[in-house]
Image (spheres, rainbow, N blue to C red):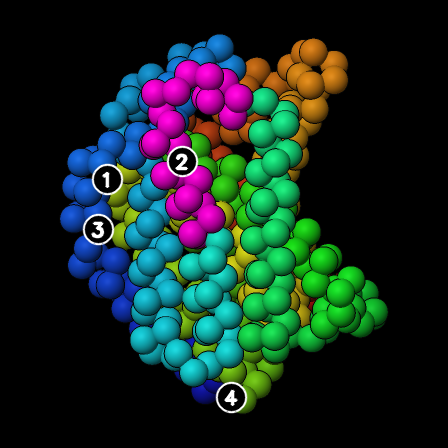
Amino acid sequence: MLTSISFFMVKEVALWVVIGAVSAGLWVVPLINMLYKLQFTIKHIAMPSKANEEWMKIHAKDSGTPSNGGILIWLTVPAVLLLAFWHIPLIKAAALIMLLVGLYGMVDAILDVVTKNNVAFREFQNKFEWRVGKLLVSMAVNVGVALLIVHVAGIKSVDLLGLSLQLNSVLGIVGLAIVSTFFSYATEIIDGIDGLSSGMYIITLLGFTLLMLAYPANFFTSPNTTALAVVGVLLGVLIVYLYFNIPPARFYMGAPGAMPMGPVFLLLGLYGNLLPALIVLMLPYLFDLATSTIQLLSIRFLKRKIFKIAPVHHHFEALGWPGPKVVMRFWLFNLGIVFLAILAQVYFG
């Protein structure tokens, strides 16, 4: 039988899921129409090149489908959270992190649209130097994320393996910015097949929900009792997004929706003092990012590819796996990761 606190938490999550879904549902169709009108097409399809010809063989059918449907997440989630809890530090931090990182992603998306017919610039975007430059800019953005975590959410320290890690120092801010940058890239790069990223995010958020039920004291320290609202609204909006992203997709996620997810996962993990669980929950995303990094470095310095296409979810497509098979197996893998994360927190937290 559920305890009173557990029953309250389940009820709260359900309530915010419904609120998030309704809020997203009110404007998702006009958003889709706007994206088609503005021709926010995927950059690889908008301007094919030698660097992505293998990818084009698999995804040529997606031509004409707009990207940046993640705008639905980027704008809906902060709007709902701030309208309901604008005075709560955790909510402020979560909303501002989503707005800040999503804005960076949106600028990148607009740049893609503005330069989609510029062949030379497209080729430059595939170069090592461009990627390193973007990494440095992203790291500067994530310094802002780190400051929001420490000074707005009020998370000054976290525990890991019996050690207390201080975050409210220059070293702590720099370390947080680096971690947030990699988390942001990791949740963005896994976006690439219909239904993949949003399904992965939903499963990870369900993992956080289970952790909140298992460790209510970590999340219900007065007056900041609103971590459930962050998770619930995100789940609700993602459910609506996934409805329209199931094959054949009406739109794709894009950087505005995908990039903020990693920093928000970081915020939730730090807020609940759940570092062992957070590290395990991020493993699928970081592994996908690692395969892309390995591929990039191998091409740069060894002049050869390790994978047919990177990141690895596209490698499986190139091996002949249908997209839905890749997606569902990634979902199942991530579900297993959720339970490993809970065990990691139990034994190492």
The circle drawn on residue 35 is 1
Residue in the image at 33% along x and 49% along y: 71
Residue in the image at 51% along x and 83% along y: 224
Within 10 Å of the Cα at label 4, are there few (<14), some (14-19), or many (20+) other Cα atoms?
Answer: few
Instruction: Decide if residue 289 is on the left or right side of residue 119.
Output: right
Mark 1 or mark 4: which comes first in sequence? 1
Q: Nearer the viewer, residue 235 or 302?
A: 302
Q: In the image, residue 158 lies at what x, y percent?
A: 72, 71
| Residue at the spot of label 3 | 28
Mark 3 or mark 2: which comes first in sequence? 3
Q: Nearer the viewer, residue 150 or 8?
A: 150
Is the C-beta separation of discs 3 and 2 under 8 Å?
no
| Residue at the spot of label 2 | 111
Secondary structure under the numbered disc 1 in the rendered image = helix
Q: Cα distance, mark 1 to mark 2?
A: 15 Å
- Quarter of the view holding residue 95: bottom left
Is the C-beta separation of discs 2 and 4 under 8 Å?
no
Residue type, mark 1 in image: Leu
Q: Cα distance, mark 1 to mark 3?
A: 11 Å
Residue in the image at 35% along x and 54% along y: 73
Instruction: Decide if residue 209 is on the left or right side of residue 149.
Output: left
| Residue at the spot of label 4 | 223
Q: What kind of secondary structure does the magenta stretch mostly adopt? A: helix
- Boundaries of the magenta span: 102-125
Is the C-beta separation of discs 3 and 4 under 8 Å?
no
